[in-house]
Image (tube, rainbow, N blue to C red):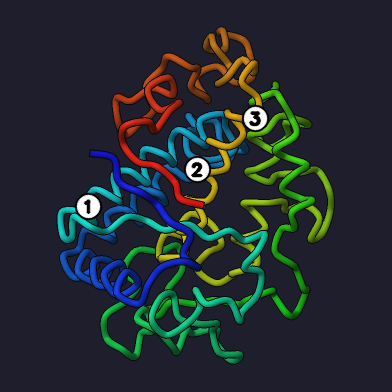
Amino acid sequence: MAHTRRNQSGLSRAERRRFVDALLKLKRRGEYDEFVRMHIDFYVSDGERSLRVAHMAPSFFPWHRRFLLEFERALQRIDSGVSVPYWDWTKDRGPAASMWGEDLMGGNGRREDRQVMTGPFAYRGGQWTIKEGVTDGDFLTRDFGRPQDPVELPTPQDLEWAMADPRYDVAPWDSTAPEGFRNRLEGWTSARGKERWRNHNRVHRWVGGHMLGGASVNDPVFWLNHSFVDLLWDRWQRRHPDSAGYLPVRPPSLGEAQYRRIVARHEPMPPWDAKPDDLLSHQGQYTYEA
């Protein structure tokens, strides 16, 4: 039976509590940190000469759809009534948004060390110790808006810039792709400074702390961001029904720059056997509520 993912702003107090309780139990079991490690392992930049499936590649959307589904199923083994809510960062745009309250994500990090001191994931509460990371430190960190070099969350205009592009992705199929919905929403550009980050990437930058880089899953807000990204992919497909869909269709050939570095439509995405083709629709698995 399909379940429903809802906007976090519309969750009841009981729904917030059930979601947080499932997260904390998954953490106590050690399963949460397995998801952190997986994302670290598959966060491969296009500067490396190896296969990329999670980021800077056409499979950004289907890989994270499967990743999110695996996580959601883990939560539902604890509480079958739980689903991953989404954060519409074009509307809930600041530290005062309800999602940063004590009963959901908790708030910003303190100034001196960026340690999150409020909410269920504060280290001092004893339930959320960072165990998998690329830097040392036991506590969750955030740095809303990066005050030392301010950055803002994406605007509706930023999002429209991505949604209006009818092409799924374009060569060279990496962070330098000049056009295409995938890279415009993932958010890599050739600009300098804060303008380098758009949409999804800018959200990670705005939250800061652990949300920067491959260990970003340590911050549970990761899932709310990617639930919205998944919803946006669905909206883009509906908006562009005549699009060619996932590209590239054929794998790059020997001698091409992306040979064995990206997956084509019918190739499996590690660590699963699932292919992008298998994940072009979520029909029958879950729905989104506005």
Using the image, determine if residue 116 lies above or below residue 43: below
Task: Name the residue rendered at 35%, 77% in the picture.
Answer: 13
Q: Is residue 250 left or right of residue 105?
A: right
Task: Name the residue rendered at 19%, 69% in the picture.
Answer: 25
Q: Which of 43 and 121 lies nearest the eye of the viewer? A: 121
Label 2: which residue? 230
Tell me the amino acid under the disc marked 3. Answer: Arg
Looking at marks 2 and 1 on the same chain, the residue that comes earlier in the sequence is marked by 1
Q: Which of 174 and 5 lies nearest the eye of the viewer? A: 5
Label 1: which residue? 74
Q: Is residue 284 left or right of residue 243?
A: left
Between the residue at mark 3 and the residue at mark 1, the CA separation in whole angstroms equals: 32 Å
Task: Name the residue rendered at 28%, 40% in the picture.
Answer: 2
Q: Mark 3 against mark 1, which lies toward the viewer?
A: 3
Secondary structure at badge 1 equals helix
Label 3: which residue? 239
Tell me the amino acid under the disc marked 2. Answer: Asp
Tell me the amino acid under the disc marked 1. Answer: Ala
